[in-house]
Amino acid sequence: TSVSITGTHELRFFIKHVGNSHTYMNDMPEMVRINSSEKLEVTMLARPAITFHDHLESMELQFALKQGYDFVIFQQAAHEPCPSKEATLHDAKALIELARSCGVMPYIMIPWSQRNYDDDFKTTKDIYHQVMMDNLVDGIPVGYVINRLSHQNPELELFQSDNQHLTSLGSYLESITILNTIFFETKFPGKLIYPNQSSFEEHQLDERLIDFLTKEVVHTVERFKSNYCVCGKREILDD
């Protein structure tokens, strides 16, 4: 958090996204920022196919977490080839401990399964629920949102042609799930970012679609928290 140089109180939150291609696809962290009613600063540390273990071995992460972030969101490599359950449990514990030692509140992203690989999601849920319980850390249920909507509303086209990475609309859902989980936000402007050759373009969603997606996300997060929330609602106080 920060205070403005004029001495007035300005509550600003700093979020670090730590992950892989699923993190940076469609500039998802920026979608978090532009769809929030909070004053956010977002950065990411992400490269293709990088795992929790790879991040742990990087001095870059250890340095980054000491730069005054309020929250860090860890996103594991989740599709083939992906780390074993044992590796994920071990490395998630180490990342969470590292974040807390730096005074940063950690969250674990619960990933989605590949399109049409429904059986994989049960295994995914079991792994990440254990991470949450073992480390008393809250999860962000993006996988629940994506899997549910991709089945109930396939016309939304949430997956790219590789059946693993999300479209811009899928990344939008990821971003508002993060915002609802951490900040309890329920009103979103519906701003999407689309890749356009070497740059990105911003697009505006239709109001009816914004309302529909928001209701789905809020409902899913509420159900998830009622069953699995470890830490509960927090009062975030400015220094």
Image (cartoon, rainbow, N blue to C red):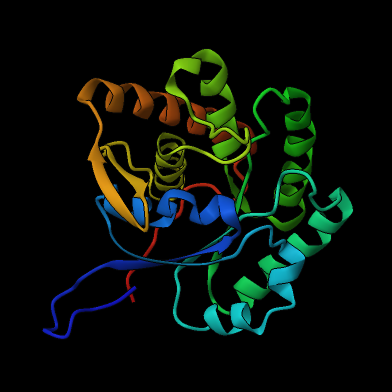
Left or right of residue 174, residue 85 in this image: right
Query: Which residue does the image show at 18% across and 73% down from the upper left?
Result: 9
Q: Hey, which quadrant is residue 117 in on the image?
A: top right
Residue 12 in the image, given as x and y percentages of width and height = 29, 68
Query: Which residue does the image show at 67% across and 33% down from the upper left?
Result: 114
Left or right of residue 105, residue 133 in this image: right
Q: Classify 192 as above or below 104.
A: above
Left or right of residue 81, residue 215 in this image: left
> Along the line of sight, which residue is nearer the eye, 197 or 16?
197
Residue 194 in the image, given as x and y percentages of width and height = 35, 45
Residue 152 in the image, given as x and y percentages of width and height = 52, 14
Q: Hey, which quadrant is residue 204 in on the image?
A: top left
Res. 24 in view: yes
Left or right of residue 184, residue 161 in this image: right
Q: Hey, which quadrant is residue 94 in on the image?
A: bottom right
Please state, as top left, top right, bottom left or bottom right, where the N terminus lies in the image: bottom left
Query: Which residue does the image show at 37% across and 52% down from the upper left?
Result: 197
Please state, as top left, top right, bottom left or bottom right, where the C terminus lies in the image: bottom left
> Along the line of sight, which residue is nearer the eye, 153 or 86?
153
Residue found at the far front of this picture: 197
Query: Which residue does the image show at 58% across and 79% down from the upper left?
Result: 102
> Along the line of sight, which residue is nearer the eye, 163 or 134?
163
